[in-house]
Amino acid sequence: MNDNKDRSDYKQPQSCHPQDVKENKKSGSGFWKELVRGIIISNPVFILILGLCPVLAITNSISNAFGMGAGVIFVLLCSNVLISSIRKATPSMVRIPVFIVVIATFVTILNLVFEAYLPPLYESLGIYLALVVVNCIILGRAEAFASKNPVLLSIADAIGTGIGFTISIIIISFIRETMGTGKMELFGRQLFSVPGLSAHPLIFFISPPGAFLVIGIMMALLRLVGVMKNE
Amino acid sequence: MLKKILSNKAYPVVFLAIIVTISVILLIAVNSFTSKVVESRREEEVTSILEEIFPEMSRYELEGEVYTIYQDDIKTGYAFKASGSGYGGNIDILVGLDNDFGIIGISILSQTETPGVGSRITESSFTDQFKGLSASDIALSSEGGKIDAITGATISSRAVVDAIKDKMVEIIDTLEN
């Protein structure tokens, strides 16, 4: 089995090229195609392996995952819309500084709003909320997609990638919180608790090494499914 | 006309400047709106934590670092903030004292200790140990004091103990003079 071949099968940056997208648009299904692509085929966490810093750090509780997911969707959507709408006026020489300023503005707004209205979430996300600025998912979508495609498709791309990211971190944090605390709490309300496990939780899972382990196993499983399908 | 602007050498600079200006204006607007909310919430937080330690409190006065607590215009105690560095970062603690400088209660305001291990410094089984102690009693029991450290979290426990002790001595000094 050739490892390189497997890689190329599902790690290609799907339809980042403007030509592909134009074809999609003619068929009228471009919007949904971009949306689904971001969630499954080029899932930012499990397939592209982008933006792992917040993924590793904040997935110790499912409330954090929801908060971070919502934040990333907001920033991604706003920055994609704005960057796409000014793409023809943006000189390529200063495009990266422009992207960074746009993204940083929305992240700072997000920070201020979270601090004012969602203080517990703001506390538990800590520095990682501000670090969304340098999250390569967002800059990556700006550079690879929004700066080359019309606004509507950029919206689809942002929603798809954002939901893909959110689903991934929810799955990881679900596993980590269940194993690491023996119970599941969402915004202060307890959803369920595992008898036996809640009295003696596997604390390892909510510590940083647990994050690596869970993400590694998830990737391996997805890989296995992908390999089996291709065969 | 449009092409002439876009190909001008100064255009990239001007464009970036415009983007930054818009960004700054937007952030000033949002900040002026949210900073009031944040400020009023911080005050509420301090009041509610003080009320936990001093349930009979009617009002407090902040002078320097010391909160003086009044109950119907009679002084019932003091409170102050202490902070020390634990295993995973800073630990902020609010300490309540009675008029004779004995501890009425403590409350951990913020901490970033290891979840499930060091983070147990916030549990009442640990914080309740401080009740009624004077500055000389505050030390881990392994070092001749009256506080039992949390199993597996000696660094976090010691950080709390040391922070409270150091600040308490300092505060009592200033109050007595």
Image: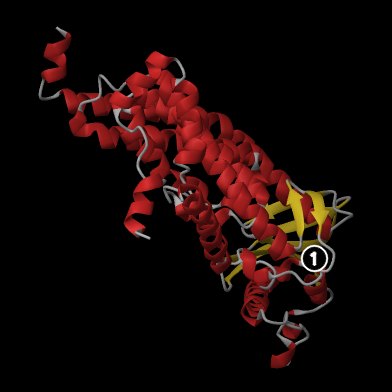
| Residue located at (51% from left, 59% from top) | A220
Parent chain of label 1: A
B162, above or below B97, in the image: below
Residue at which label 1 appears = A198
Q: Is residue A167 visible?
A: yes
The one of A136 and A219 positioned closer to us in this rendering: A219
Tell which residue pokes out farthest to the front in this image: A231
**Whole-percent x, y for residue B108 in the image:** 70, 63
**Whole-percent x, y for residue A191 in the image:** 80, 49
* Mark 1 secondary-structure assignment: loop
The one of B69 and B110 positioned closer to us in this rendering: B110
**Whole-percent x, y for residue A66 in the image:** 63, 43
Q: Quadrant of residue A25?
A: top left
**Whole-percent x, y for residue A218 in the image:** 55, 57
The one of A222 and B175 positioned closer to us in this rendering: A222
Q: Is residue B177 visible?
A: no
Amino acid type assigned to the residue bearing label 1 in the image: Ser
